Amino acid sequence: AHIVRGLVALVVALYSGRRAEEALDLDAAGLFSRLGLSEHLTPQRSNGVRSMVERIRSDARRALAAQA
């Protein structure tokens, strides 16, 4: 669906080129809240966005742990 591709594009744009530390410091939920994104998404799509962000954060934590 076009909406899902757009949401993925937003998340990619937000995190693309950032180091692991920056990814963990980024407040994606706060940004999406300020944009009013959740007001226009179904609960399932909001959960999907949260899941994408959490996966990125989890990968960033793993990358940092591997460096230690």
Image (cartoon, rainbow, N blue to C red):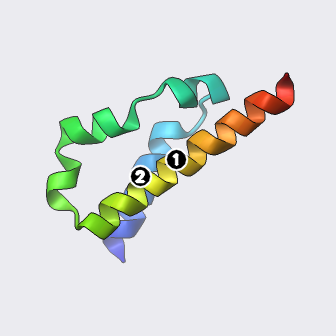
* Number of other residues with Cα within 10 Å of mark 1, as a class: few under 14, some 14 to 19, many 20 or more: some
| x and y percentages locating residue 39 in the rendered image | 14, 54
Q: Are there few (<14), some (14-19), or many (20+) residues within 10 Å of tag 2?
A: some
Q: Position of residue 4 (x, y in %)?
A: 38, 68
Does any portion of residue 19 appear in the rendered image? no
Q: Relative to residue 47, is residue 40 drawn left or right?
A: left
Q: For marks 2 and 1, give the CA distance.
A: 6 Å
Mark 2 is on which residue type? Arg
Residue under label 1, please give it: 54
- Camera-side residue: 23 or 51? 51
Q: Is residue 52 visible?
A: yes
Disc 2 and disc 1 in contact, CB within 8 angstroms: yes
Q: How many marks?
A: 2
The picture places residue 44, in percent across and down from the top left corner, at: 32, 69
Residue 41 image position (x, y, % from top left): 22, 62
* Dot 1 amino acid type: Glu
* Quadrant, the C terminus: top right
Residue at 45% across / 58% down in the picture? 8
Q: Tell me the number on the disc at residue 50.
A: 2
Residue 18, compared with residue 5, is above or below; it is above
Q: In this image, 33 relative to 28: left or right?
A: left
SS type, badge 2: helix
Residue at x 23% of width, y 67% of height: 42
For the N terminus, the image quarter is bottom left
